[in-house]
Image (cartoon, rainbow, N blue to C red):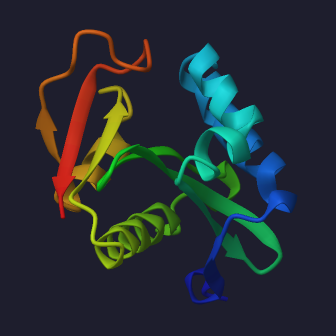
Amino acid sequence: MDTIQNTTIIPFDPKYAQDFASLNIEWLEKYFVVEPHDAELLERCEETIINPGGHIFFAKVNQDIAGTFSLIRMEDGIYELGKMAVSPKFQGQKIGQQLMQFCIDFSKSQGWEKLVLYSNRILENAIYIYSKYGFVEIPMEENPPYQRGNIKMELVL
């Protein structure tokens, strides 16, 4: 069975808020720690991401939530691509790439200017995918929102 055929990308629904948090906590705890800024975004995603004009999407494979990402409003036309995660159970099935393509298409359809993301160089697969989709490294500001962040990238849409 080709699971890629069964992947659907769906918008945020409060019933998936816990999936959003658990998928992200899983990878954060594997590589880093859950920082206060992460906890605020993950535990109160409707208040901190959706209500201020952001978006959260999920990759659903059959009945399972396999991955997620958010678009966090920074200012008009500029959004942070954040909290992108794919469940270990679904890794290696190109779900992250499907999410990335959807993210870019959605952002362009909104008429946004650019996407920005923060990451860490030890996440080589993630950095590879970001670069593959056109993100380029830009200078990091003095006080980035995440302590673990040691690379900042942007995609001009």
- Regarding residue 26, the answer to whether it shows in the image is no
Q: Nearer the viewer, residue 136 or 46?
A: 46
Residue 89 in the image: x percent, y percent?
Answer: 70, 56
Residue 74 in the image: x percent, y percent?
Answer: 38, 40
* Placement of 76 over or under 123, stated as above or below: below
Q: Quadrant of residue 30?
A: top right
Q: Is residue 37 left or right of residue 139?
A: right
* Placement of 123 over or under 77, stated as above or below: above
* Placement of 16 over or under 61, stated as above or below: above
* Placement of 116 over or under 33, stated as above or below: below
- Regarding residue 124, the answer to whether it shows in the image is yes
> In the rendered image, which quarter contains the C terminus?
bottom left
> Which residue is depicted at the point 36% across and 72% down?
101
> In the rendered image, which quarter contains the N terminus?
bottom right
> Which residue is depicted at the point 82% across and 58% down?
14
Residue 43 in the image: x percent, y percent?
Answer: 76, 33
Q: Residue furthest right?
A: 15
Q: Nearer the viewer, residue 79 or 153?
A: 79
Q: Quadrant of residue 97?
A: bottom left
Residue 3 in the image: x percent, y percent?
Answer: 63, 81
Q: Is residue 116 left or right of residue 97?
A: left
Disc tally is: 0
Q: Is residue 114 left or right of residue 19?
A: left
> Which residue is depicted at the point 19% across and 54% down?
155
Q: Is residue 43 left or right of residue 35?
A: right
Q: Quadrant of residue 44?
A: top right
> Which residue is depicted at the point 79% across and 51% down?
17
Q: Nearer the viewer, residue 122 or 52?
A: 52
